[in-house]
């Protein structure tokens, strides 16, 4: 585990990702923000940290060893005193996220790696600014992907000309 300078910390971010490179990128990304980063390498370590010292937000890789990011999100959302914590799933560029599974576990967003540092900072700040959800209410699903244009209305059936009716 590692962390940034804790003298000006307003929030704690738990990063669960087995990539040391991603851990370092996230630590550097938040070095000048009021966010302390706690980095762990697998789902078991993430759950241990959650149970010991709950963070304000979690970024969890969907493909890390042990419990996946989906499993970590489910643990958070199914645990009443943790359910208010926002969870963002991290996925590789060639590792598509399972949107149905992400919604089912109650994640609050998805970021594909590699990502722009400002995008990560923005997403984290938006989620930290949201009012906390009550621990007993179900988690809101992640934002839906852009929907295609509305389906056109069915064409009306042609009207038959008025005339004698046939039996």
Image: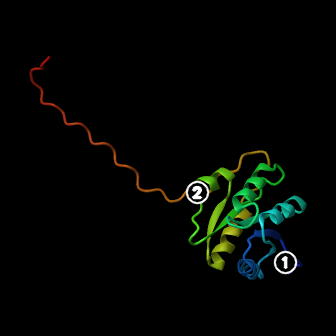
Q: Which residue is mark 2?
A: 99
Q: Residues within 10 Å of mark 1 (few under 14, many from 20)?
A: few
Image quarter of residue 121: bottom right
Q: How is the image coloured?
A: rainbow
Q: Which of the image's four quarters has the N terminus?
A: bottom right
Q: Residue furthest front?
A: 66
Q: Is residue 109 above or below residue 20?
A: above
Residue visible at 76% across and 70% down in the picture: 15
Q: Which residue is mark 1?
A: 2
Image quarter of residue 162: top left
Q: Is residue 9 above or below residue 132?
A: below
Residue at disc 2, secondary structure:
helix
Q: Residue furthest top?
A: 167
Q: Position of residue 62 (x, y in %)?
A: 67, 64
Q: Nearer the viewer, residue 21 or 142?
A: 21
Residue at disc 1, secondary structure:
loop
Q: Position of residue 94 (x, y in %)?
A: 56, 71
Q: Position of residue 119 (x, y in %)?
A: 63, 74
Residue visible at 78% across and 82% down in the picture: 31
- Tell me how far mark 1 sits from mark 2, CA to CA: 31 Å
Q: Position of residue 142 (x, y in %)?
A: 63, 56
Q: Residue furthest left?
A: 164
Q: Is residue 31 above or below residue 75?
A: below
Query: Which numbered marker is on residue 115?
Result: none
| 28 left or right of 53 in image | left
Image quarter of residue 41: bottom right
- Disc on the earlier residue, 1 or 2: 1
Q: Nearer the viewer, residue 125 or 29?
A: 29
Residue visible at 77% across and 79% down in the picture: 27
């Amino acid at each position: 585990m590692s962390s940034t300078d804790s003298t000006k910390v307003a929030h704690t971010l738990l990063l669960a990702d087995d990539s040391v490179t991603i851990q370092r990128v996230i630590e550097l990304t938040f070095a000048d923000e009021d966010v302390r980063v706690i980095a762990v390498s697998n789902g078991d370590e993430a759950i241990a940290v959650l149970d010991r010292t709950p963070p304000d937000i979690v970024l969890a890789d969907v493909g890390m060893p042990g419990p996946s990011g989906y499993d970590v999100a489910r643990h958070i959302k199914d645990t009443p005193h943790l359910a208010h914590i926002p969870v963002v799933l991290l996925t590789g560029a060639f590792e598509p996220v399972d949107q149905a599974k992400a919604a089912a576990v109650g994640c609050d967003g998805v970021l594909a790696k590699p990502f722009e540092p400002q995008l990560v900072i923005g997403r984290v700040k938006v989620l930290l600014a949201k009012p906390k959800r009550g621990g007993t209410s179900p988690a809101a699903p992640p934002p839906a992907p852009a929907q295609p244009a509305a389906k056109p209305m069915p064409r009306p059936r042609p009207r038959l000309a008025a005339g004698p009716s046939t039996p």
